[in-house]
Amino acid sequence: MAQILGGVFTSHVPAIGAAIAKGLQQDPYWKPFFDGFLPVHDWLADQRPDVAIMFYNDHGLNFFLDKLPTFAVGAAPIYQNADEGWGLPLFRPCQGDAELSWHIIETLVANEFDVTTCQELLIDHSLSIPLELAWPDQQGSFPVRIVPIAINTVQHPLPSPKRALALGRAVHAAIESWQSDAKVVVFGTGGLSHQLDGERAGHMNPDYDKFCLDNLATNPDALTQHSSLDIVDLAGSQGIEILNWIAARGAMGDGVQEVSRNYHIPISNTAAATLLLQTEAAKVMA
Ligand code: DHB
Ligand code: FE
């Protein structure tokens, strides 16, 4: 049986990618954010996961407002980054785990999550930047195979936090029934509070962010007390990317403990956070 070792949760602001490309990790503006990844590096070096299941949102690279799946699962052998217009260099491609993707898709559909399946999928900043943050300074390929799971956080109607948590829990069941001895880590990318446009551009909400960070490990159901529209109100129109974190937490199962957390305002227009959680399987293996 595959083992789920932990979860890495992080903001995915495009400017982080520019800072990586320019080597600004020690710059006073950037250091407080990048230092939050030092415990993640140690943990990943200890645990050596084989596969990363990545809950994220596509920002118009694959899906635009004319066709936007609520939930989509990648089932490609490889995922290439592509230019989205942020002026970033192209980041490294990442190998997929198509076998696990299809197992997840089959399990989800059997559990009445009617997902869109993507045998070709480009990855945008919300996957590439978390991968580069987690495994930096590597000339070669990433040491994991990925399964991307995209959640619509960009166009109404948005899925509810309750549904995102249930999706994650269904993915957890899929991992548990996967006949493999692979070690799995989950990622949730985006957030925390931010709003990029409109009258409230620049809106952030440290109280709501703290509520999320405090409850995600031990009481993720607390995050379902708000509707998606409540969260847009509380956390900003892009703060709803917390749905990706909620789903990723659901995929971890029970017995989850916090390893490290970092919260830093602002990075660009975003209240940036990095949270590392682990399961009991990780503690046994450490
Ligand atoms: C920013 C944050 C995001 O999550 C994103 O997708 C794009 C930009 C920002 O704060 O600049
Ligand atoms: Fe985003």
Image (cartoon, helix red, strand yellow):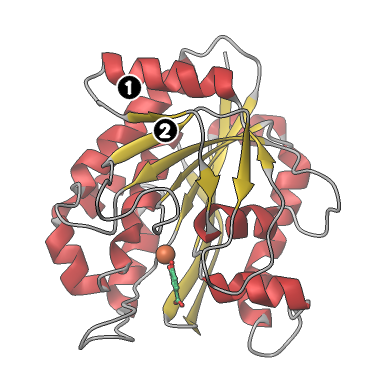
Locate residue 255, reporting x and y percent.
Answer: 44, 35
Q: What's the CA distance linking mark 1 and mark 2?
A: 10 Å
Mark number for residue 205? none
Give the x, y percent position of residue 119: 49, 28
Note whether 99 is above or below 135 in the view shown: above
Residue 58 shown left or right of residue 148 in the figure: left
Q: Quadrant of the C terminus?
A: top right
- What residue is drawn where x is 31% and y is 77%? 195
Q: First in sequence, mark 1 or 2: give its number.
A: 2
Badge 2 density bin: few <14, some 14–19, many ≥20, Cα 10 Å: many
Residue 59, relative to residue 270: is it above or below?
Answer: above
Task: State the residue position of label 1.
Answer: 108
Residue that protrudes farthest toward the front in the picture: 66
Instruction: Kindly identify the residue that appears in the image at 76 percent across and 82 percent down.
Output: 26
Q: Is residue 171 left or right of residue 109?
A: right
Q: Are marks 1 and 2 in contact (CB under 8 Å)?
A: yes
Q: Nearer the viewer, residue 85 or 31?
A: 85
Which residue is identified by label 2? 73
Quadrant housing residue 108 = top left
> Regarding ligand 2, which quadrant of the image does it lie in?
bottom left
**Amino acid type, residue under disc 2 in the picture:** Val
Q: Tell me what residue is drawn at x 24 percent, y 51 percent.
A: 66
